[in-house]
Amino acid sequence: MKMLTKDQMKCYADNGYVVLDILTESEIEELSTEYDAIFTRKAQCNLEATWQGDWNKEKTQTSVSSIHSLQMHSAVYSRFLHHKKLLDACEDIMETPNILLHHTKAHLKPPGVGSPFPMHQDYHYFPFEKDSMIAVFVSMDDADPHNGGLCVYPGSHKLGPQEDVSNVDGWHYLSQEKFPLENATPLSLKKGQIVIFSYLLIHGSYNNNSDRVRRMYLVQLSSAEDTMISNLHPSACQGMVLRGACAERDANIKKRHNDHLQALQKSKGGM
């Protein structure tokens, strides 16, 4: 193992997640300052990302702002993707030295009206044959149930994929009766703490009813030895090698633009 202790590895194996203190105070502040700068620059864009569907029975109006692919907005977040200690920890968990970027995103829950996220598995958004995908969840603020913090069903990654009951295309969630938010385990995190979890872990987050903002940043990674079952979530820099190599990457000169053109067509409704 390069980074994690035996106890941390056991925690991940048993629970499907592990909480880590990896970042220095200066690294946390740099990420935090740049996070705010990005959201300020993009304030006039449509950033609303409240989860759609019939899962939420509450009638109150809530909001969450989201920006994807932060590495396309700032070099601070490009550098973070190559953070040595973080990739060491990911290599331990993924059991491979060959790590690919799938996508990144940031969610900001404003005070008082921050939207909850239903219990779900990331699997339904981007299924892989070997289930190698993990999420790196960076808590950009002190977070708890009061300001919309993360919650999980420990050990639920062992259940495998559960039924997707969403009634809206492009949004996925599980039965909220079978996996109610109130029965989940809250994770109270300090600013800068990182949670690494399996994409099979059942997780969600609470309303932000507090007077505090809740910001998070997420990186999703897969093994270069794994294969997507379906590419439902094409994103900027998808497939970028962050560590090791990708032996399966096609180098055919005639196909060098294919991935970009297909993603472009899909974004314009051409697929």
Image (cartoon, grey):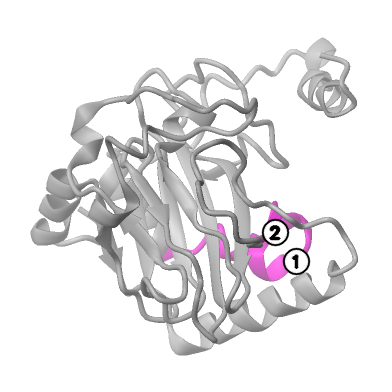
**Disc 2: CA contacts within 10 A as few (<14), some (14-19) or many (>=20):** many
Q: Position of residue 3 (x, y in %)?
A: 26, 61
- The numbered dot on residue 70 is 2
User: Quadrant of the image for the C terminus?
Assistant: top right
Answer above or below: position of 267 versus 59. Answer: above
The amino acid sitting under disc 2 is Leu
SS of the residue under disc 2:
helix
Is 190 colored magenta in this rendering? no
- Whether tag 1 and tag 2 are in contact, CB under 8 A, the answer is yes
Question: Compared with residue 151, is residue 100 higher up or lower down, i.e. above or below?
Answer: above
Q: Position of residue 87 (x, y in %)?
A: 41, 55
SS category of the residue bearing label 1: loop
Q: Is residue 36 above or below residue 165?
A: below
Measured as percent of width and height from the top left, residue 266 is found at 81, 22
Task: Between residue 46 and residue 26, name the one nearer to us.
Answer: 46
Q: CA distance from mark 1 to mark 2?
A: 6 Å
Q: Is residue 122 left or right of residue 232?
A: left
Quadrant of res 254 = top right
**Crowding at mark 1 (Cα within 10 Å: few <14, some 14-19, many 20+):** some
Residue at position x 51%, y 46% from top? 56
Q: Nearer the viewer, residue 65 or 251?
A: 65
Residue named by callout 1: 74
Q: Which residues are magenta?
A: 65-84
* Magenta stretch holds residue 74: yes
Of residues 111 and 249, the one nearer the viewer is 111
Q: Is residue 48 visible?
A: yes
User: Identity of the amino acid at label 1?
Assistant: Ser
Residue shown at the point (43%, 48%) measured from the top left: 135
Is residue 184 at all visible to an observer of this figure?
no
| 194 on left or right of 31 | left
Residue 135 appears left or right of 182: right
Q: Is residue 86 above or below residue 158?
A: below
